[in-house]
Amino acid sequence: MSEVITIGSATMDVFVECDDAGVMSVRLKDKSADYMSYPYGAKMEITSFATQVGGGGVNTAVNFDNLGYDTCAIFKVGDDIYSQGLFDFFKTKGVKLNSVIQDKSDSTGFSIILVSFEGDRTVLAHRGANAHIKKSEIDFDAIKNAKLLYIAPLNGESNRVLDDIVKFARENDTRVCFNAGTTGIKKGFNYLKKILELADVVVMNKEEASMATKINLRPDTKDVKYSSELIHPDLKEMFKKLKVSDYQVIVITDGKHGAYAYDGKKYYYCPVFSGHVASTLGAGDAFASTFCAGLDKFDLDISKALVAASINSSGVVSVFGATQGLLTFDEIQARMVQNPDFKVQTIDA
């Protein structure tokens, strides 16, 4: 029996950094976007190169284990050099792998991460076996006996198992933390709502929340300065639409701008914990899973859970590799004590 079960993707990640890569911003009247750019047709020198294990199922399992939870991971891999690399990685971890699915006819997930000079990244992902998890392959007994089920984004055909997994967990009093992915979101809000209704904690980034709710954050104009408000009014509308059950906590992350939460009574804003940024890959996984663990650790104190999540994700972005900079709870709490002015702001709903 494990306290925490994680289900999600497992990949081999190749990090590529090129100092000559540019960042191009495109702004329209009602939205803006940034693009990583390379000269078309050019051959460019790589500044740095590294290979790491990653994927939402892996990253969060390693984090829960590092935070002191007895953890079991469910993910699907092929039978190739990349799956062997994944299994070798876990030899130094305490995560249980007895529920991992291996299919010799499939390939293990693989990603190429293009890192910008600002530390942000663009990911080229081959889903492989990650997209082919079947209901018959899921270890439901492990979920039944767990305290928490953490669902990282599931892609492709794997998304079809979401309904059954969440419903089963709820029926067996296993708390659910749901980190929504674009595959499920693209199915429409009516589909997503069935999952949201059963999840105790829901985490999305701002772009995913906008996609799910069909609400865009309006930019400042010469007459209205939305940025001067602690919580953007359109963000409030996103929260209200996403929160479909009374017991839920909804979290929306916004990269370098921090994170927000809503419990039906208050809105919460947590800034980013400052530090060196080498790569943002894995920051979202660290934040979401630490927030869920923090709610358990701090007796459902949302503010403390947000602070813990921000501190831990800052450790991840300080180095290359989605699991390399993870902190223990003792280390997180030590930094909380050392930085008493790092606090969450709240306003009544």
Image: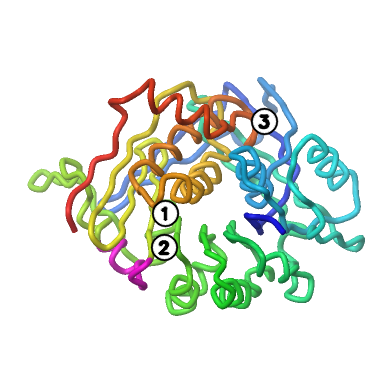
Q: Position of residue 286 (x, y in %)?
A: 54, 42
Q: Which residue is mark 3?
A: 16
Q: Position of residue 48 (x, y in %)?
A: 68, 22
Q: Position of residue 98 (x, y in %)?
A: 82, 57
Instruction: Give left or right: position of 93 versus 243.
Output: right
Alpha carbons under labels 3 and 2: distance apart: 29 Å
Q: Which residue is mark 1?
A: 207
> For mark 2, does the 10 Å Cα neighbourhood hold few (<14), some (14 to 19), or many (20 or more) residues?
some
Give the answer, above or below, for where 56 lies relative to 271. below
Alpha carbons under labels 1 and 3: distance apart: 24 Å
Q: Amino acid at mark 3?
A: Val
Quadrant showing the N terminus: bottom right
Residue 262 figure quarter? bottom left
> For mark 1, does the 10 Å Cα neighbourhood hold few (<14), some (14 to 19), or many (20 or more) residues?
some
For label 3, the SS is strand
Q: Which residue is mark 2?
A: 211
Q: Please report whichever mark, 1 or 3, sits nearer to the chain's N-terminal start.
A: 3
Q: Residue at x 31, y 69 (%)?
A: 241
For this rendering, which residue is in front, 71 or 191? Answer: 71
Q: How many marks?
A: 3
Q: Amino acid at mark 2?
A: Met
Q: Residue at x 86, y 56 (%)?
A: 78
For label 2, the SS is helix
Q: Please report whichever mark, 3 or 2, sits nearer to the chain's N-terminal start.
A: 3
Which region shows up in magenta?
237-247
> For mark 3, does the 10 Å Cα neighbourhood hold few (<14), some (14 to 19), or many (20 or more) residues?
some
For this rendering, which residue is in front, 67 or 11? Answer: 67
Give the answer, above or below, for where 187 lies relative to 347. below
Q: Amino acid at mark 1?
A: Glu
